[in-house]
Image (cartoon, rainbow, N blue to C red):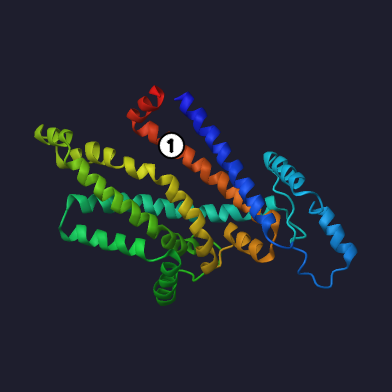
Amino acid sequence: MKRYLIKRIIMAVITIWAVITITFILMHSVPGNPFMSESKMPKVVYENLQKKYGLDKPKSEQYFIYLSRIVRGDFGDSMKSRVETVNDMIERGFPVSIMIGLEALIIALAVGPVLGAVAALNQNKWPDYLSMVIAVIGISVPSFIMGTVFIRFLARNIGYLPIGGWGGFRHTVLPSAALAMMPLAQIARLMRSSMLEVMGQDYIKTAQSKGLSKATVVIKHAVRNAILPVVSILGTVVSNLLVGSFVIEKIFGIPGLGMFFIMSISNRDYPLIMGTTVFYAIVLVSMLLIVDLAYIVIDPRIKLIKEGR
């Protein structure tokens, strides 16, 4: 277990370093710089700005300076904001984004497995068909279209839920629901196929032959084993929720980190682009590491295999 954990941490660090390096190279490969759009900027002001943000230094030196800052947890100063650093923007926007993402994750984990299990236990019956129709809609319809549909039919027609903005729990319901639809559908489909496979196993037939109730067989034996594939994709689900929230935040006017990311691209704010990208990479890699460890805890057989290598 300890050996496996050390390997995963080393791989996580290498992955984050690769993201930092690739992002830095891509940002500095784009022709021009953030200050070239200022047509009336005096030459001395332009040179001072270049010097302030270290853009006058060789690219290799800039890279190692930035890498040392990342190690200290410093993402640098925004080139466009006069009052906030990149750390300040992340500190202000990420709690909003994580709230939307966590609510969407809770919806997906609460509804998806249940939907899949019900479909499997009622194979080729109307609950199965209804569950799979919902799953197909969730996978086929992008979250931004789902968000627009929710705004049109739930916010405008019903009037209880706000169309957009940020102010409390009511403002999170529609964006979280729209963001949750795709992972919910993926989990439901995976849970259905996994349940169908598990219900045909010998140990399930043995449990049934012992006279155990259907609820006991399903909950204690079937669901516990069928849920393992769902746990294995949680890292991907979380990453999709965080990245997908960019578009949802834009549609619903939510002041999350996605707003800063989109703003940084349009303004060519190098530190903000790299800071938000690297920060998300750190979060996502950490989530994948946690999911791997959770998978080992849930299924001890994985632990034995890993320790045997």
Instruction: Please state which amino acid type lies under the numbered disc 1.
Output: Asp
Q: Position of residue 277 (x, y in %)?
A: 60, 52
Compared with residue 165, is residue 287 higher up or lower down, i.e. above or below?
Answer: above
Which residue is at the far bottom? 157
Pointer 1: what residue? 292
Please tell me which residue is depicted at 56% across the width and 47% down the height of the picture. Answer: 281
Would you say 29 lies left or right of 243 here?
Answer: right
Which quadrant of the figure has residue 12? top right
Q: Position of residue 309 (x, y in %)?
A: 40, 24
Please tell me which residue is depicted at 83% across the width and 58% down the height of the picture. Answer: 49
Q: Secondary structure at mark 1?
A: helix
Please tell me which residue is depicted at 57% across the width and 59% down the height of the picture. Answer: 258
Compared with residue 56, is residue 167 higher up or lower down, i.e. above or below?
Answer: below
Between 190 and 208, which is closer to the camera in this rendering? 190
Would you say 192 lies left or right of 1 here?
Answer: left
Q: Quadrant of the N terminus?
A: top left
Q: Position of residue 26 (x, y in %)?
A: 64, 54
Q: Position of residue 183 (x, y in %)?
A: 39, 55
Between 43 and 279, which is closer to the camera in this rendering? 43
Would you say 242 lies left or right of 278 here?
Answer: left
Between 68 and 156, which is closer to the camera in this rendering? 68
Q: Residues within 10 Å of mark 1 (few under 14, many from 20)?
A: some
